[in-house]
Amino acid sequence: MKQVAKLFILAGLIAVMTFSCTKDKAPVINDTIDYFAMPKPLNALDSLIDTIQHTYGLRVIYKFEPRVIDPTTFFVPALINRAQGYTKYVVEKMWLQPISIFAPQFSKNQIPVEFLTIGTAVHFNSISSGGAAGAGLNGQYYRLGMGDVNSFVVNRAWIREHINILYHEHAHQLDHKFGRPKGYDQVSQGLYYDLQYISRTDEQAQKDGYFRAYGGFQPVEDFATTVEAMMRFPKDSILKIIAKNPKLETKYKMVNQFYLSKGIDLHMMQIKLDSVVKALIP
């Protein structure tokens, strides 16, 4: 009986060991997915976006998900044919390329990593709210967003004017990143129009110390509209405008020095962009 019991126990141990070995054996997985492979471009716009990202480190986004814009923000995505032309002419040819050539330090350190193309305008919190991208969308370190992309046309005047607004919006991003120059907000402290700017003309605003009536809204727009003006007008025109009010001259000098310290001469870029757009669209 003892011998039989020993054989029974031994058989049990062998069965347990066999079961354990079978249980611990790694399963065979036939996994052919390369999780690190980049997705293949789906169309010509995707291919252009990949090229821009590889060249300049910026990803143009025209497909949206909650990570990109939160659900409380209302907007119309850009039409793909408008987004394609806009990405080529505005983002690549008129913005990234000239900066990389004429202001390489600025290109290296101050260009964001994402660029959102919005078909119309952005509305925050409610679809009935005022439509504007502005500081609400662009007051962040890594992303720039522009509306009105569905209005894009291969037209010299449209593209040149839009690039002025793009520099305005990028100024909001730099404002958020670095803050406005020290003492800037105190130059016109207590004199900003607030919402009453809508009843002012640009001519009146310049006499009051702002390049545009909208710049008189508050300091953040004062800063951005100064940048915008420096991209729109040649230097001699700027000097005539700032002669209208010492406060305007002071703020202009602060903004000019701010951008020079970041590696870009806005007056020089204004001249270059005039030349680029004429060559791009004869």
Image (cartoon, rainbow, N blue to C red):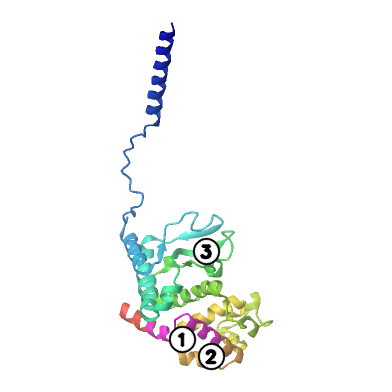
Q: Earlier in the sequence, mark 1 or mark 2?
A: 1
Q: Which mark is residue 122?
A: 3
Depth check: give the residue in front, 262 or 125.
262
Depth check: give the residue in front, 185 or 179.
179
Q: CA distance from mark 3 to mark 2?
A: 32 Å
Q: CA distance from mark 3 to mark 1?
A: 28 Å
The reply to whether residue 281 is in sight is no
Q: Position of residue 249 (x, y in %)?
A: 57, 90
- For the residue labelled by badge 2, is the local secondary structure a helix, a strand or a loop? helix
**Residue lying farthest right?**
190
Question: Residue sitting at 54 percent across and 70 percent down?
Answer: 134
Residue under label 1, please give it: 233
Q: CA distance from mark 1 to mark 2?
A: 10 Å
Residue type at numbered disc 1: Phe
Image marks 1 and 2: residues in contact by CB distance under 8 Å: yes
Q: Which residues are magenta?
A: 252-272
Local crowd size for mark 3, using a 10 Å CA cut-off: few (<14), some (14–19), many (≥20): many
Local crowd size for mark 2, using a 10 Å CA cut-off: few (<14), some (14–19), many (≥20): some
Q: Which mark is residue 241?
A: 2
Residue 79: within the magenta? no
Instruction: Please state if 117 lies on the left or on the right of 191 as rendered.
Output: left
Location of the N terminus by quadrant is top left
Residue 271: within the magenta? yes
- For the residue labelled by badge 1, is the local secondary structure a helix, a strand or a loop? loop
Question: Residue sitting at 47 percent across and 60 percent down?
Answer: 76
In the image, is residue 14 above or below residue 77? above
Q: Earlier in the sequence, mark 3 or mark 1?
A: 3
Q: Position of residue 14 (x, y in %)?
A: 38, 20
In the image, is residue 55 above or below residue 236? above
Residue type at numbered disc 2: Ile
Which quadrant of the figure has residue 23?
A: top left
